[in-house]
Amino acid sequence: SQTIHQWPATLVQPVGSPLSLECTVEGTSNPNLYWYRQAAGRGLQLLFYSVGIGQISSEVPQNLSASRPQDRQFILSSKKLLLSDSGFYLCAPAPRLLRDETEAFFGQGTRLTVV
Amino acid sequence: GQQLNQSPQSMFIQEGEDVSMNCTSSSIFNTWLWYKQDPGEGPVLLIALYKAGELTSNGRLTAQFGITRKDSFLNISASIPSDVGIYFCAGLYTGTASKLTFGTGTRLQVTL
């Protein structure tokens, strides 16, 4: 089965500082990978997805960027954080949807507070 | 980005009561998923629905995939305190990207 590692769990960063969040996936090869953000009290918003190494698609215009340097590694970055970048960031591979084996995991998440 | 309309937004219920929540979309999906999220953690999958009209149960949870493929509902029977959390629906139209579109969430709080 798939395992998702996401770190750090919590991060407090000043406005204008850079950001790097890392996500790695085990137990699968060539996965589609996704970054979501959840603002306080809200649902999950898809930020980026990647169907392979070096392939990034952005869903919403924003201050963030993503990279896929290796098959099982997905990185979320920013050169200069804004207050509005605060939120709970979640990484996930594509759901594996089989009737007898359904897997739809998320990482543990990173709670980012920009101050 | 698109989000699905989920209702109710929040609800207080007494332990032992049944709960219903639903999700509607302007787009069709070929898979519906229901998740539960506890504070500070990522969502955990509860039920997956693969076919229009399908009714699926997981313990005290029952979910249905709407005939129009644009809606789904989740029922929780005989609620208990550990049912507290936020429930999200998610729609998926499988393809190269297989992107999940999430509902806005239903916050469930149970009073003893």
Image (cartoon, coloured by chain):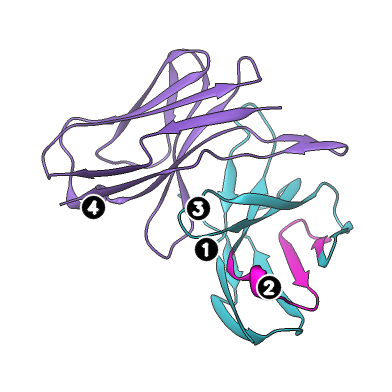
Q: Amino acid at mark 2?
A: Met
Q: Nearer the viewer, mark 3 or mark 2?
A: 2
Of B85 and B47, which appears nearest the observer? Answer: B85
Spatial CA distance of label 1 from label 4 is: 19 Å
* Residue depicted at 45% across the width and 43% down the height: A109
Residue at (67%, 31%) from the top-left corner? B95
The label on residue A84 is 4
Q: Is residue A50 above or below residue B75?
A: above
What is the C-alpha distance between the residues marked 2 and 4?
A: 30 Å
Image-based side of B54 in relation to A66, left or right: right
Residue at mark 2 shares a chain with residue at mark 1: yes
Instruction: Read off the magenta span.
Output: B62-86
Whether residue A13 appears in magenta in the rendering, the answer is no
Is residue B77 magenta-colored?
Answer: yes
Q: Residues within 10 Å of mark 2 (few under 14, many from 20)?
A: many
Vertical position of residue A77 compared to residue B53: above or below = above
Is B19 displayed left or right of A16 in the figure? right
Residue A99 location (% of width, % of height) = 86, 39
Quick one: SS at disc 1? loop
Q: Judge the density around disc 3: few (<14), some (14-19), many (≥20) Cα neighbours within 10 Å.
A: few
Crowdedness near tag 1: few (<14), some (14–19) or many (≥20) residues, C-alpha within 10 Å? many
Of callouts 3 and 2, which one flags the residue occurring earlier in the amino acid sequence?
Answer: 3
Residue bearing the label numbered 3 = B2
Instruction: Give the CA separation, mark 2 to mark 1.
Output: 12 Å
Give the colour in which the image draws chain A: purple
The chain that appears cyan in the image is B
- The amino acid sitting under disc 4 is Ser
Give how far across and how far down residue B97 sits, in percent. 59, 30
Q: Which residue is mark 2?
A: B21
